[in-house]
């Protein structure tokens, strides 16, 4: 048998198009071919399980091999393989997805089989880096092996091969200007990026493993070593497991696996796990966060059936959560479409609001189960929470259950506790509750003392977005307003019984007021000579709250 034929595509020659436009990133060819090898392996596993393939599966790993002299890169699997007819159908008809066909055919049993392919174009991405591609394949069905060769023109050759074991070998003859893909370190890099958590073990070369010394070894004896397969992936990453099967330490280990260079431990994790009305798994981590808003945003990785897709999750995850780290895996996110389309997509919107809800629920339960621990973490997580309250209405509503308002004395109030505590005492003449806050404990110290003397609570609100949050609270909550502790209308609050007597008489008070007013010579400030009992200042300079905010 030896035959020639023309690849069946509507366009006269699709290869220049594929090379140029199919994917902007040439490197993803490896992801596509390893995905196909993985699919082939999982398909065979599935057929064996349901009794449609009577084969000894053996050690089902995928192997990647570089031959520098021949200038080839090979991807070898022990999967389902292809018969001659199947090569005709799946390879020679561009854009016919065998993966979709398989899922359609076995839809009752194969929903959870983890099959990756979708579009029926992945295989041809090989031509982005190779000017000749060979497929040597033998089906698990008892049929002869075949050898397909194509040099990047629509003409291919198909002949018999002498492969005896089932499975497929794809050989890429790497083109002159893509020789980086013949370098070990480059391939290692790509496998680590795209295939690190794929479900079938992937072997790339060997590595030297150090064994424990035998008991009778002398101290100067070197530890024995052995060559073992270099498996680059973890086929069972934590996010694919049930939360009930994982300990806290497992999550920490997974964090380390994801971010080997990150030495700080995450504050806590959220395990996402939903299969209706869409499929989504994942683990999000709250890293320690400081006041810096210019945080790198590409920290959550998006996977599809354990294949890395992107670390740009904009449009899929609500923006305030892009400050988190971790993994999201969903076959239901349309990937080969533009970001603006994504944002309008109904499924994506649902996913986004599900994630928001899960994060809010987790924060609530952390707060309820261990309030003290939650208060300790507040400074490191407040930025995400405050940002979320500002940008997502749903999150704002839920946040009353866990958002904290700390005082300068490190007492932490929830919103309701705060209003209960100060509601009556800190009312102004219009009946509004005025919430006093400081933004800098040292600088505003004397004002804080003065407010405390009147029995008022002073919050410490110092995050970079807190002025926006206050505005949001003022418009959303009934009858409250915020005033910085050095703002003038603190004086308008209905006071506790005055029981302190001024050390100055009225005339002296007037003189002091005039003197200070002359010195600061500004109409933007008010000078008040106060009756104070303690070591707080004998007079205060205050500024209307609206003027201060205008300057911000
Ligand atoms: P998709 O994966 O989206 O179906 P591809 O272009 O990546 O599209 O592959 C087309 C088809 O070729 C696959 O669906 C599969 O039937 C077949 N195929 C590709 N690679 C292999 C392989 N390594 N083993 C068996 N079949 C394969
Ligand atoms: Mg594919």
Image (cartoon, grey):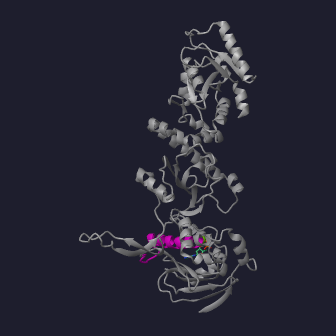
Looking at the picture, does residue 205 appear above or below residue 1? above
Visible in this render: residue 551? yes
The image quadrant of residue 494 is top right
Is 309 placed above or below 229 here? Answer: above
* Residue 463 percent across, percent down from the top left: 60, 38
Quadrant hosting ligand 1: bottom right
Query: Is residue 474 shown above or below 70?
Result: above
Quarter of the image containing the N terminus? Answer: bottom right
- Secondary structure, magenta segment, majority class: helix
When the figure is inspected, residue 84 is found, relative to residue 485, above or below; the finding is below
| Magenta stretch holds residue 298 | no
From which residue to which does the magenta span run?
32-57
Q: Nearer the viewer, residue 47 or 238?
A: 238
* Identity of the residue drawn at 62% across and 18% down: 427
Q: Nearer the viewer, residue 32 or 430?
A: 430
Closer to the camera in the image, 459 or 78: 459
Nearer-the-camera pick, 248 or 512: 512
Give x and y (percent) for residue 297: 62, 52
Quadrant of the rendering where the C terminus is positioned: top right
Position of residue 226 measured from the top left corner of the image (x, y, whole percent): 37, 75
Residue at the image position 60 percent from the left and 35 percent from the top? 462
Queried whether the magenta region covers residue 50, the answer comes back as: yes
| Among the 4 quarters of the image, the one containing residue 229 | bottom left
């Amino acid at each position: 048998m030896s035959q020639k034929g023309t690849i069946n595509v509507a366009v006269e020659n699709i290869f220049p198009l594929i090379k140029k436009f199919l994917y902007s990133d040439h490197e993803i060819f490896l992801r596509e071919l390893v995905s196909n090898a993985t699919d082939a392996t999982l398909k065979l596993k599935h057929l064996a399980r349901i009794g449609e393939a009577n084969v000894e599966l053996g050690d089902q790993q995928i192997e990647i091999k570089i031959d520098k002299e021949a200038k080839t890169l090979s991807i070898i699997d022990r999967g389902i393989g292809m018969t001659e007819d199947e090569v005709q159908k799946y390879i020679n008809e561009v854009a016919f997805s065998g993966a979709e066909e398989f899922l359609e055919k076995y839809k009752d049993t194969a929903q959870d089989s983890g099959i990756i392919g979708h579009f029926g174009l992945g295989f041809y991405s090989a031509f982005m880096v190779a000017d000749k591609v060979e497929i040597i394949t033998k089906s698990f069905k008892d049929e002869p092996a075949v050898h397909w060769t194509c040099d990047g023109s629509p003409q291919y050759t198909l002949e018999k091969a002498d492969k005896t074991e089932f499975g497929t070998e794809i050989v890429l003859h790497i083109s002159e200007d893509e020789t980086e893909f013949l370098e070990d370190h480059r391939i290692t890099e790509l496998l680590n990026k795209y295939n690190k958590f794929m479900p079938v073990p992937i072997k790339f070369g060997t590595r030297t493993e150090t064994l424990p010394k035998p008991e009778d070894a002398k101290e100067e004896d070197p530890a024995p070593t052995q060559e073992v397969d270099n498996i680059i992936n973890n086929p069972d990453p934590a996010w694919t497991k049930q939360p009930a099967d994982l300990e806290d330490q497992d999550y920490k280990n997974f964090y380390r696996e994801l971010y080997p260079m990150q030495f700080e431990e995450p504050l806590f994790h959220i395990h996402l796990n939903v299969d209706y009305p869409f499929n989504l798994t994942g683990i999000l981590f709250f890293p320690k966060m400081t006041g810096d808003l210019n945080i790198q945003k590409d920290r959550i990785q998006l996977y599809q059936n354990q294949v890395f897709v992107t670390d740009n999750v904009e449009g899929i995850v609500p923006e305030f959560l892009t400050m988190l780290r971790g993994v999201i895996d969903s076959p239901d996110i349309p990937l080969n479409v533009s970001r603006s389309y994504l944002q309008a997509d109904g499924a994506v919107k649902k996913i986004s609001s599900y994630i928001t809800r899960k994060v809010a629920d987790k924060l609530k339960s952390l707060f309820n189960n261990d309030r003290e621990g939650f208060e300790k973490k507040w400074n490191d997580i407040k930025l995400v929470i405050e940002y979320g309250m500002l940008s997502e209405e749903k999150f704002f509503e839920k946040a009353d259950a866990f958002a904290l308002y700390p005082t300068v004395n490190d007492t932490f109030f929830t919103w309701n506790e705060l209003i209960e505590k100060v509601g009556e005492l800190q009312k102004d003449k219009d009946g509004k509750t005025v919430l006093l806050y400081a933004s800098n404990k040292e600088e505003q110290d004397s004002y804080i003392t003065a407010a405390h003397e009147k029995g008022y609570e002073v919050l410490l609100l110092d995050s970079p977005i807190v002025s926006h949050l206050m505005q949001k609270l003022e418009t959303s909550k009934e009858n409250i307003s915020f005033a910085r502790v050095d703002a003038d209308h603190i004086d308008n609050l209905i006071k506790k019984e005055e029981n302190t007597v001024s050390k100055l008489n009225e005339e002296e008070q007037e003189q002091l007021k005039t003197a200070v007013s002359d010195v600061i010579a500004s109409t933007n400030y008010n000078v008040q000579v106060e009756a104070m009992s303690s070591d707080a200042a004998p007079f205060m300079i205050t500024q209307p709250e609206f003027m201060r905010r205008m300057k911000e």
